[in-house]
Amino acid sequence: MKRRKLLSLLSVFCLSLVLTISCAQTPESTTSDTPTQVNPDTPPILIGYSNWPGWWPWAIAEQEGLFAKNGANVELRWFDGYLASMEAFAAGQLDGNCQTLNDTISFASSAVNGEVAVLVNDNSAGNDKIIVTEDINTIEDLKGKKVAIEEGVVDDFLLTLALEENGMSRDDVEIVNLETGAAAAAFASGQTDAVGAFPPFWLTALKREGSKELLSSKEFPGAIPDLLVVSQKLIDEQPEQVQALVDTWFDILDFMEQNPQKADEIMAKRADITIEELQQLKDGTKIFTLEENLEAFSDGDNMKHMPFAAKKMSKFMLDVGFIDSEPDLTTILDDQFVKAYADGK
């Protein structure tokens, strides 16, 4: 999943001039017993997703008719590049997108229709890694070393958390700011001592002789939540469609549990990978249950709670100059749809 280059406000504005959306009509309201029939004459809501294990399950809903079952009038838009999906959403071309919490914070102030997280799909639970040379065995060993990383993005945040936990800071290492693919290549060719990367790029990094994993997102639960984010415009105008999206996600999880082989086949095909590769990447992705969603949206004093995590991420991005000012974090998280699903069970 190619991650996290902040689009400038000017770029978003320019894109918004040439992109149009058509999501003004509101389908009939749904009930828990009788799903809404999708009206073919009503423009669908457009949801973007891209190549990350926690988002591949949406393809199951499309193939198995789960959107229609829940009265969700949805058209999925696949993006080969994650950045392109964020740009399109921020500019108003999409009604929703699959993206991380830190990226939602990044775009919160500039998105033309607002950006609001309504569902946690997963947490990275090992798929984001810090890879090092064979002589580095502890976080303290990174002191003074060159670390290739894409500044301001999730693996930079992961590195910062690990350094802080060990009484250090980013100032204790030499940051080599490179796009994640280039960072992995630089490490693999011996130009740096460490690299922060997500799949498939850490596979490239591990090709360097003697290289190894020093730490991963598995050690920092909640640090990298992957979300369904919709526009405030959609929430205001078609809240029943947002609810139908959230309801559909939990039907997807039920399908995956009851039909694991078929689910894996659908996801592997969507991701254009083998079943074996799918299993390897699934191991580093923690798909969230309903109970974990409720916990993530709730207030708390650690990274498992998104209100807390959002404040820490926002401070991090301000410190590294990735954003100019802290957005209103109270507007980017909305748990009403997850709670409504829980109340209806």
Image (tube, rainbow, N blue to C red):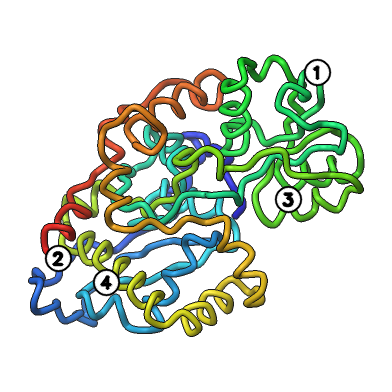
Residue holding disc 2: 345
Q: Name the residue: 30% across, 27% down.
A: 328
Q: Residues within 10 Å of mark 1 (few under 14, many from 20)?
A: few
Residue holding disc 3: 202
Which amino acid is tagged 1? Gly
Q: Earlier in the sequence, mark 4 or mark 1?
A: 4
Residue holding disc 1: 144
9 or 345: nearer the eye? Answer: 345
Q: Earlier in the sequence, mark 2 or mark 3?
A: 3
Q: Name the residue: 30% across, 50% down.
A: 293
Q: Name the residue: 72% across, 15% down.
A: 172
Which amino acid is tagged 3? Trp
Whole-angstrom CA distance, mark 4 to mark 3, is 40 Å
Which amino acid is tagged 4? Pro
- Which image quadrant for residue 298? top left
- Which image quadrant for residue 165? top right
Dot 4: element = loop
Q: Earlier in the sequence, mark 4 or mark 3?
A: 4
Dot 2: element = loop
Q: Name the residue: 9% across, 79% down.
A: 34
Q: Earlier in the sequence, mark 1 or mark 2?
A: 1
